[in-house]
Image: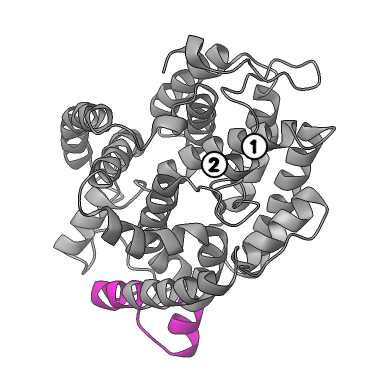
Amino acid sequence: MSDADRSPAIRIEGGAYSGGRPADPARADAQDGPATASPSTSPGRPRIAALDVVRGFALCGILLANVQPIASVVDLLAPGSAGGPVEEWMGLLVEQRFYPIFSLLFGIGFSLLLESAAGRAAHPRVLLLRRLLVLLVMGVAHFLLLWRGDILSTYAVLGLLVLLPSTWLPRWAVAALSPVLVVASWFMHGDRFLLIAGLFLLGSALARYGVIDRIERSTRVPAVLGLVFAVAAAPALWWQVTSRLEDMDLWAPSSLAVSGTLLAGVYVCAMLVLLRTPLRAALQVVFAPLGRMALTNYLTATVLVLVAARLLGVPVGRSWTAMLLTAGAILALQWLWSTLWLRRYRFGPLEWLWRWATWGRRPALRVR
């Protein structure tokens, strides 16, 4: 679909935000969790299923990466210790590979929600400001009470500093600025804040150019993009392996950031291609419930890991086997809980509260 085929740009309060289509509450509110906006406002309205699946898949990777850091800062299994080949594979396939996906989805959801708010609220940016502030409160509480590795507070602050001001920019400027920040992060020793900011803007640009509208209509585009990412990721992974900091037994930050970003692109494209195959139904069953309740599952995962490590005495921080089994058990429990919950309710518990705080009115919870 060319720009000429699209509906007129949405102008918000005289600003430069240019959405690619009319505000559609069902579409714009169709995705919730740490990475996106809110679920559909009425039964039967279409969700963007691919985003649910990709988010659920990323949630699994985030948990794998976070289990040991959450479990213990004392018994944490350090790189190069008894982990052996499992540690190497985690470093190649998991570490810093999944939060870039969440960052991209956060930018997508922000712009989708802004499109929706433009047609439903007198001051849509105020609504987005409130949403980010509520996320900041949740993130700070998570940081202070449970785990110092919280990402929600980082997303909220960068959303306030980067995403909200970007709504005054034309979409071409947002699209041009995003790769600049991503590449800058690579040269700044893998600076996480620059990388997240760049991916926020990339996700926002994809939504504003209408790419998300077409995300499930093509196999060729994600296949070609995935191949490009894979070709670029191969030397980046080799760089990561050969640039290990032996004195500290750590991966070099820049190599890890570059390979992580490129491999995240491979993962996203692979999932989009698989969703165009007969595996679609299975992927939706496995990942969509986790993705639809991503905020609830992200926060409760911290509690479950702490219970396993500190109350049940599972040696998560000293054994890769224990870590993998713990992560698998938590994901299985969350999948069951999410699947059963969403049969009766339209939102996850925390997603519902977040939506309530965002819009200032209590949304219906039960499925009609």
Q: x and y percent of residue 265 in the render?
A: 31, 36
Q: Which residue is mark 2?
A: 106
Q: Which mark is residue 159?
A: 1
Is residue 33 rendered to the left or right of residue 309? right
Q: Is residue 176 above or below residue 73?
A: above
Q: Secondary structure at mark 1?
A: helix
Which of pointers 1 and 2 indicates the residue nearer the eye?
2
Q: x and y percent of residue 15 in the render?
A: 75, 17
Instruction: Check disc 2: other Cα within 10 Å, few if <14, some if 14-19, many if 20+.
Output: many
The first of marks 1 and 2 along the sequence is 2
Is residue 109 rendered to the left or right of residue 229? right
Q: x and y percent of residue 39 in the render?
A: 59, 52
Is residue 189 rendered to the left or right of residue 311? left
Based on the picture, tell me whether residue 7 belongs to the magenta stretch.
no
What residue is rendered at 29% in x and 77% in y? 325
Q: Tell me which segment is drawn in magenta.
A: 305-327
What residue is rendered at 14% in x and 61% in y? 85
Q: Secondary structure at mark 2?
A: helix
